[in-house]
Amino acid sequence: MAENILSVQDLHTSFTTDHGEVMAVNGVTFNLEEGKTLGIVGESGSGKSVTAYSIMQILEKNGSIRSGKVLFRGEDITKWPESKMRDFRGKKCSIIFQDPMTSLNPVFTIGWQLEEAIKLHTDRKGKAAEERAIEMLKLVGVNEPEKRIHQYPFEFSGGMRQRVMIAMALACEPDILIADEPTTALDVTIQAQILELMKDLQKKMGMAIIIVTHDLGVIAQMADEIIVMYGGRVCERGTAEDIFYRPAHEYTKGLLRSIPSVDKIGQRLVPISGTPINLLNLPKGCAFCPRCDAAMKICLEQVPPETRTVDGHLASCWMAVKKEAEAGMINFTGDSGRSLKADDTAGAGSGKD
Amino acid sequence: MFKYIVKRILLAIATIFIVCLITFFTMNAIPGGPFSGEKAKSPEVQAALEKRFNLDKPVGEQFLLYMKNIAHGDFGVSAKTGREISATINSKFKVSAKMGILAVLLAVVEGVFFGSIAALQRNKWPDRVIIFVSTLFTSLPSFVLGSFLLVIFSVKLGWVQAWSPQHQSLILPVLSLAAYPAAYITRLTKTSMLDVLGQDYVRTARAKGVREGKVLFVHTLRNALIPVVTYVGPMIASVLTGSLVVEQIFTVGGLGNEFVQSITNRDYPMIMGVTIFLAVFMVTMNLITDIVYKLIDPRITLE
């Protein structure tokens, strides 16, 4: 098994607002193996972007990591001083954002912005930095890079700007690339190109990728492992096959029902009813419970533990626990909610093994 | 760029011509004239004076003659003092400009500094204090502030000597002149800075590992100053050419003062001279503003 380059353990992140504490991330745990791709999927407000920003420690001023660890090569970077974090950002771990139209500074040339990152983290200065910038633009498929480094962002299309963002993120050969909804703001043909480019660059440069998206199609194409998030918690994790063909969490099932596919032509899509939970006031039990068709009494009262499903991936759902019980593996009476004995519930942090 | 500047200069000439036209005829429409003062003059003297300043001719012809003269660079002499208009403007403008430049510098430095602080310390006490003070200064008329400063610091405390030709103490007039623009720039910078701080590209800069100081002064400030520049250009023109109120209160003999006196005196050549000077200055400042605007924001195309 490859080494874990990044390990997030029981991460809690919240934002202080006038209305109270917004609990955006509530105990997220995952491991990222060197050179692999992890997909984080969930709807708006599920805490997936906040998880990504927490890793980089680029949260808004009112946000902070309350508890948990982010281990980079075994070192807890949440303990690092700001000066050391600056070296982490852009050099060890880079991020590209959702909207390429606004992610580049409008008043500086593309070359200036690329070279800034290069000069910060490598020994290349002046001409050498410019050469590296040109090389990176060539790598991400920007034509005539010698000419284009002197242009401004407004002279680039959306797809081209996202290529520039990728070039900038990878210029210092980071170990990890976080892509926060990298294709959401782009049209479909450009989306495919950008995803292709990311896969291609991963082959060439060998970085690990965390791709954050609400688009299940994107995840299916890219990720080796997927975590599904809801209400700031991980509700299910497994390979793309596990998630798409053997979903165990009611939320994952709902998500899959709500996407169009060729098999479902002529059928109505089934949306997940209700609205995302209020992160100011998290329920005591499962966050998805108020919208869940299969909710039981226990769902209201206790947060479901991460349980190994019959086929071997992990889900945090009492239904999954119940199924286990029915399969005779553990002792469970869901509706009483009290007599739970989950001997085989995988504890948080065990990840996959 | 060159083509654009040439085009703007041609337009400016047209603008100034229209300003001259309107001023000339409006000025003549006001009852009285430069020589209709209280002191009785003999009809011969009156006629001779009027002939000297072409006042005996029809207004239309007067205008054409005047335009012909200024085309040759001759602004004539004052109908009151007989001194060269250009020499008078030159000396009066020096006084106003000296005061104005100091006021502009003070306003810009103070405004950008406190505006940035207010944005960075948003909703904390420095922000509240800064915004309270700047709101106060934007709503305080300069004659109130000027008189207030004069009474407190010159009369009561005696810290600053009042302005006189012998002792040109500029502190108080500069302060009263700078108060409004400084307060305005503070608020403008704060709003604009807050807007820019929330932009994605600021987050990108942080994510690249850029240090916070550079994020603020390079990535944020340059964008935040774009709206400030649009205000500062015309402000420079209006502050440098003298404020009537401030010059009156501190008895500074500047251009603003001169302009109002020339109107009261119906000193036609002087009115025209100052008007043209102000128009040229304003148009030039607008052109410079647009060019600077283009320099800091590459998205602007000068067409």
Image: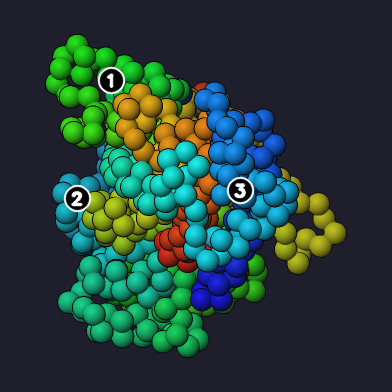
Q: Quadrant of residue B124?
A: top left
Q: Which residue is mark 2?
A: A82
Q: Amino acid at mark 1?
A: Leu
Q: Position of residue A351 (x, y in %)?
A: 34, 54
Query: Which amino acid type is shown beneath numbered disc 2?
Result: Glu
Q: Please report, as a chain letter, where disc 2 is located.
A: A
User: Which is nearer the eye, A252 or B112?
Assistant: B112
- Tell me the CA gap for discs 1 and 3: 48 Å
Considering only order in the chain, which callout, 3 or 1, is on the residue closer to the N terminus?
3
Q: B196 or B245: nearer the eye?
A: B245
Q: Dot 1, how many residues are within 10 Å of its Cα: few (below 14), some (14-19), or many (20+)?
A: some
User: Which chain is disc 3 placed on?
Assistant: B
- The answer as to whether the residues below labels 2 and 1 share one chain is no
Relative vertical location of residue A236 with respect to residue A264 in this rendering, above or below = above
Residue B57 x %, y %: 70, 49
Tag 3: Cα neighbours inside 10 Å, few (<14), some, or many (≥20)? few
Q: Helix, strand, or loop for circle 2?
A: helix
Q: Is residue B291 above or below residue A48?
A: below
Distance from disc 2 to disc 1, alpha carbons, whole Å, reads 47 Å
Which amino acid type corresponds to the residue marked 3 in the rendered image?
Lys
| Residue behind mark 3 | B51
Q: Nearer the viewer, mark 2 or mark 1?
A: 1
Q: Secondary structure at mark 1?
A: helix
Q: Position of residue A165 (x, y in %)?
A: 43, 69
Q: Is residue A326 above or below residue B132?
A: below
Residue B86 screen position, x and y as percent: 42, 53
- 10 Å crowding of disc 2: few (<14), some (14-19), many (20+): some
Q: Nearer the viewer, mark 3 or mark 2?
A: 3
- List the residue tagged with mark 1: B149
